[in-house]
Amino acid sequence: MTSTSTESHTPVAAPSRRWWTLATVALAQLMVVLDATVVNIALPAAQADLGFSDGDRQWIITAYSLAFGSLLLLGGRLSDLWGRKRTFIIGLVGFAAASALAGAAPTFGVLVGGRALQGAFGALLAPTALAVLTTTFTIPKERARAFGVFGAIAGAGGAIGLLLGGFLTEQFDWRWNLYINVFIALVAIIGAAVFVRHIPRTGPRPKLDLPGTVLVSGALFLLVYGFSNAETEGWESPLTWGMLAASAVLLVAFVLWQRRAVHPLLPLAIVRDRNRAAAYASVLIAGAGMFGIFLFVTYYLQTSLGYSPIQTGLSFLPMIGMLVLAAQLSTNLLVPRFGPKVMVPFGMLLGSAGMVYLTHLDAQSTYAADILPPLMIIGFAMGSIMPASMQSAVLGVDRSFAGVASAMVNTSQQVGGSIGTALLNTLAATAAVDYVAAHTPPTEAVLADAAIHSYAVAYWWGAAFFALGAVLAAVLFRRRGDGLSLATPRDVEPEAARTAEEATAAV
């Protein structure tokens, strides 16, 4: 949809200011993404300190993902209504306060409450960060570079969380996995106050779609909760299927309501565009595969090979390096030349190959020969998928809906991660039980082999996820020159784009 907003003609910020804005937004995005994994490594220490049961420990993770996943679309729309800069700072302040509360938690209940508040403010912060980039970088080449950095952060944040979590837990205390957010947020708040532009609203102030908000928040809550319940209670649980069915009903009701709402929370034209639909599907599938990698490779390194938390985190660093390298190559060279129709399927096929490589791991595998190569392959794959998908997801969206379009990116990644974690974990657990049943008696060696076998089953399914993603991306993404192009964002008027390029050239 072509923008008619006068925001397209606002003066372009000085180049140095734009790049400082990117640094601020990337820092905030890193904080939100890594918090989905940074606490995982700290769980045993937190459990020993606060004395909660094995059955309760999942709520430390689930409370965050439930609030985050179910409120993302609302957070994106609020950024459209309140303004990007104001919403961004509110999200940072709230996330810092929630992190401090959770870090100082004297009881299990307070810790869970703090994590839920983190998720709620993260749902406000994450889509706003992406929307700030969308409205700040209007020159095609610079926008591609900015999204390359942002995509690298989104893809690598989970691995960075594992590394940071291991270091803080071993060197300080589990609570510092939460306190660290306060310091990150303070730096980001200062950066936002100084560098993020406030773009004044023009025209009448739209209203919030309350019925749509309730329907989609309830649907996403039940979807994430249903898959989380499947992870712990199994797929035979009536509660699991009841929640998933209820989620489907609410999603249908939400779509029907959006077709008639005067001020829709999610204008359906945003997701009906083929490129955006392909982008959201790609982010969802990549999220499912990526969360599976972190889960099973982490367990393999620590339980099968005896790595410490810090060693585990360091093991993921080459993958992060390849992801960042691929993201920069993709945004600066490959995506402008080949487009997402080539780059996203290419990344998906690489991801599938990396997953297949991981299926060969056993108790005698070495890091350099057997673990490092597939991690680097998967890192390059994610760096090829995420930037192109993120650009396509928000390209051409009217500025007044940039926040909710950005929220769909985060929603896709979060839902994909929830589905991937629950489904792969259930398949792995079933495979482990079947392996033990076929290799009696269940000696310690048999149990160790069962665990490695279960990881291999998860990797095979992860490879299938990526292969499906390659097919969907190849079919759904439009050819270059057919409709939207990544190099020609429709939300920038030609005159404004020329003015921006001339202003940059003059500096």
Image (cartoon, rainbow, N blue to C red):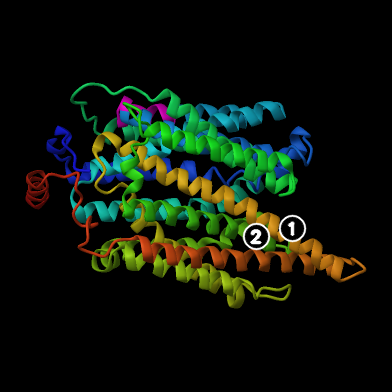
Residue at 33% x, 65% y: name it: 341
| Most common secondary structure along the magenta stretch | helix
> Hey, what amino acid is under mark 2?
Phe
**Segment tinted magenta in the rendering:** 81-93
Q: Is residue 324 left or right of residue 312?
A: left
Vertical comparison of 115 with 347: above or below: above
Is residue 83 on the magenta stretch?
yes
Badge 1: few (under 14), some or many (20 or more) residues near its Cα, within 10 Å? many
Residue at 47% x, 60% y: name it: 320
Is residue 92 on the magenta stretch?
yes
Q: Is residue 482 left or right of residue 44?
A: left
Q: Is residue 6 left or right of residue 32?
A: left
Q: Which residue is mark 2?
A: 296
Q: Inspect this view and state whether residue 326 appears.
A: no
Q: Nearer the viewer, mark 2 or mark 1?
A: 1
Q: Estimate the x, y position of residue 81 in percent, counting from the top left.
A: 32, 26
Q: How many marks?
A: 2
Q: Which residue is mark 1?
A: 429
Q: Is residue 163 left or right of residue 502?
A: right
Vertical comparison of 349 with 220: above or below: below
Badge 2: few (under 14), some or many (20 or more) residues near its Cα, within 10 Å? many
Residue at 48% x, 34% y: name it: 253
Residue at 65% x, 44% y: name it: 228
